[in-house]
Image: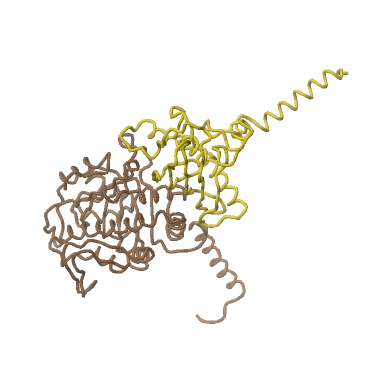
Amino acid sequence: MPSLARLRIVFVLFTTVVALLLLGPGRLGDRMIDGVPRLAERAVLTGVQPEGSVLAGPIVARGALGGELGTERRDEVTAEIAEVVDAWLYSTYLPADPAQRDATAGLTQRLARDLRHDGARDQSVLRAPTLTDPAAEIRKRKVSVDLLATRGAARAATARVRLVLAPSGTTRTVGVRGRLFLVIKNGHWRIFGYDLAKGDR
Amino acid sequence: MTGRMSLPQRIRRLSALFLALAVVGVVVPDSAVRPAELTLVKVNRAERTDAPDMIWILAVGSDARPGQSMLRTHGDALQLIGLNTRTHAATAIGIPRDSWVSIHGVGMAKINESLVQGGPHLMARSVSELVGIKPDYVMVTRFKFFERMVDSIGGIDVRNPRRFADPYLNVKGFDSGRIHLNGYSAMAFSRIRKSLPAGDFDRSANQQRTLRGIHAKIRANADKPGFIERGVTSVLRNMRTDLGPAELFRLAQVVAQVDSGKITNCVVPGGVGWVGEASVVFPSVATARRYGRDARTDAVISRC
């Protein structure tokens, strides 16, 4: 008859295997979007979300709906898309060190490749002024999501974004507004295009 | 022989009716039996390795009358539209419908005979052999749907280079300059040929003006919440297609993103003549191929 110690070891191993199977690398990977921590993870990593800091989440709003989708599922999808869009906003505009900025988080492979290699394209809209203070004031950060749904499932979306940043030490603000276009690829929402404008105020 | 049906006869007739309805329900997507007023077919599934950013759509206006299959009648308007998904440039190559060409499996005939003989795939092949560019998609629409679509976006504005009229389609005529067209007017503007100095060539150019007007309206409204989403939903209700909603959405956004200042368009030139009793156009194949070479990778034709 096996000893109690051996039974305990077997039990621990068993529960560990079950936990890993349930969580899996996919679930662990869900804490990040292309290397950008999700909103919840950013809070965990730093522990503090002062109002107006880069770690505070965007205002998320339901937009228009083409087709039919239940309210609960619509809100779930809206939140999923807002996460992807906010990860892109975060990684594109917010890191203080320009070398850390990466405007490819959450993009389709094609769009990410285009951004990395197309030097001829005007990408000034993707460049933000250097923010010396990582906790620079965010005056506005809003994402509203229009959805296209067929047969009870969301198929595509337009995320309308509004971002206003106030670099520290100035009264100037920088605004970015426009639309990001998304579809589902391999179970994940991906940005395949955008139409954005940037301006100083 | 007249008389009342027996019960077994009634059952047989009803069964046949239910069977027919069931077959139709299976064949026609989304169960509702609706007339095909707009069809979008993907004809090229291979990736364009030489021009990965390009999408080519062959737009065909069908002259199908009520009750006729839209995909087996003559194409009255033929426009090969190229879209550059990165630079947002676009081009339209107009092909006169009476162009006398060699049609695969058919022989020499007017190019719009391709749709009758082989549907969208043969139509795409014939255009590809003339211009040197294989379309990715073929879109075929009836006049009535086209009219309703233009009306649904509030009509369009076009620049008309010359005043013209037609005793059947528009007796009062179209003024020169910037004019507003409702659905019927846009259809007439795109169809009238005989009162135009260069006939089929001028008609093709007017079709391109109409396309520009439609695009301008779409672009002006594209940033309104839900405009594209609701538009795609509406199109899906009226369209037969092998594309999924996500692909349609991407196409719609590509179209909406086209920069009006980056649109170039030309009509394949040629001579007019007769083959037997048929009035035909002898297209300049060399020019058609030049347009194709010019626009293949960037949707820009440098000169017509």
B119 vs B169: above or below: above
Can I make out residue B207 in this image? Answer: yes
As drawn, the residue found furthest toward the right would be A1
- The residue lying toward the viewer, choosing from B197 and B95, is B197
Rendering coords of residue A116 (x, y %): 39, 31
Residue drawn where x is 48% and y is 39% of the image: A89
Display coloring: by chain
- Classify residue B278 as left or right of residue A52: left
**Splitting the image into 4 quarters, where does residue A120 fall?**
top left
Rendering coords of residue B279 (x, y %): 15, 61
- The residue lying toward the viewer, choosing from A103 and B184, is A103
| Chain that appears yellow | A
- Classify residue B102 as left or right of residue B136: left
Give the color of chain B as drawn: brown
Residue drawn where x is 33% and y is 44% of the image: B55
Residue drawn where x is 70% and y is 30% of the image: A19
Rendering coords of residue A40 (x, y %): 61, 37
Rendering coords of residue B32 (x, y %): 50, 62
Total marks drawn?
0
